[in-house]
Image: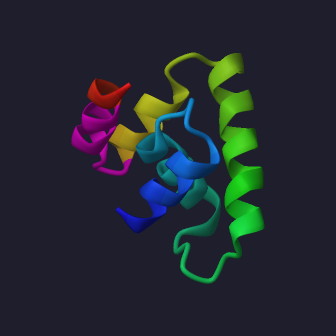
Amino acid sequence: MFYQKLLHELAPDLNPAGVEASMRLQYGTLNHLPREVFAEEARLAADCERQSPGFLRRTAESFGMGDEFTVWEAKA
């Protein structure tokens, strides 16, 4: 949940569970990444979502984070 809180701070208009999942596609673990990478990856995730609506939800679900995604959606 730490990563999702950070991502929500950096990109409040995106679902942070989806962004975290999209980051895990490339990095696997995230604990070694600086804040700047999280910011850049949030921008990339936004581009992916614009090009393919539903990308963040599908990616979150593929990582078993569908419930977290739904919780964040309810907060929006």
Nearer to me, 44 or 25: 44
Nearer to me, 57 or 8: 8
Render colour scheme: rainbow
Nearer to me, 8 or 37: 8
11 sits to left or right of 66: right
**Exactly how many numbered labels are in the figure?**
0
Instruction: From the image, give the main secondary structure of the stretch colored magenta.
Output: helix
Residue at 69% in and 68% down: 35
Relative to 36, is 63 above or below? Answer: above
Residue at 33% in and 39% down: 61
User: Does residue 68 belong to the magenta stretch?
Assistant: yes
Residue at 74% in and 41% down: 44
On the image, the x and y values in percent for residue 6 come to: 52, 59
42 sits to left or right of 14: right
On the image, the x and y values in percent for residue 60 come to: 40, 42
Residue at 50% in and 33% down: 56
User: Does residue 39 belong to the magenta stretch?
Assistant: no
Residues in magenta, as a range: 63-72
Relative to 36, is 13 above or below? Answer: above
Quarter containing the N terminus: bottom left
On the image, the x and y values in percent for residue 11 come to: 62, 41
On the image, the x and y values in percent for residue 45 come to: 66, 39
Q: Quadrant of residue 73?
A: top left
Quarter containing the C terminus: top left
Relative to 58, is 40 above or below? Answer: below
| Residue that extends furthest to the bottom in the rendered view of this protein | 32
